[in-house]
């Protein structure tokens, strides 16, 4: 049985590069603030909402590789 890897979302770093707060990320992307906050704080997640990820990719104007950091495979 294969195990799933863990990923970390670089939300906090990408927001800081743009001078945005997590609240601004939420407002600009349409992703619920508690979701943005949870994703930004997590050091490793096995699952994330794909529609939220797509919104975050669009608001940051980055590729999936720039948003998602694989920390465990």
Image (spheres, grey):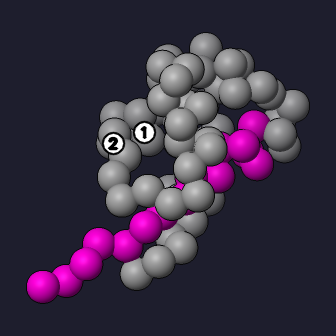
Q: How many numbered markers are drawn?
A: 2
Quarter of the image that includes the C terminus:
bottom left
Residue 67 makes an appearance in the image: no
Position of 39 compared to 1: left or right? Answer: right
Q: Nearer the viewer, residue 7 or 67?
A: 7
In front: label 2 or label 1: 2
Q: Secondary structure at mark 1?
A: helix
Q: Is residue 10 magenta?
A: yes
Quarter of the image that includes the N terminus:
bottom left
Q: What residue is shown with label 1? A: 54
Position of 20 compared to 36: left or right? Answer: right
Residue range in magenta is: 1-15
The disc label shown at residue 45, or none: none
Place of residue 67 in the rendered image (x, y in percent of width and height, measured from the top left): 58, 54
List the single residue furthest toward the top.
27
Q: Do the CB atoms of the residues marked 2 and 1 lie less than 8 Å apart?
A: yes
Q: Secondary structure at mark 2?
A: helix
Q: What residue is shown with label 2? A: 50
Q: Nearer the viewer, residue 34 or 14?
A: 34
Q: How many other residues sit within 10 Å of disc 1, few (<14), some (14-19) or many (≥20)?
A: some
Residue 73 makes an appearance in the image: yes
Q: Nearer the viewer, residue 28 or 48?
A: 48
At a point 75% along the width and 37% down the height, the residue shown is 15
């Amino acid at each position: 049985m294969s195990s799933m890897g863990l990923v970390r979302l670089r939300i906090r770093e990408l927001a800081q590069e743009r001078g945005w707060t997590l609240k601004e990320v939420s407002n600009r992307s349409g992703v619920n603030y508690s979701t943005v906050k949870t994703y930004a704080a997590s050091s490793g997640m096995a699952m994330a909402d794909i529609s939220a990820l797509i919104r975050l990719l669009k608001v940051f104007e980055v590729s999936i590789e720039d948003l998602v950091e694989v920390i465990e495979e």
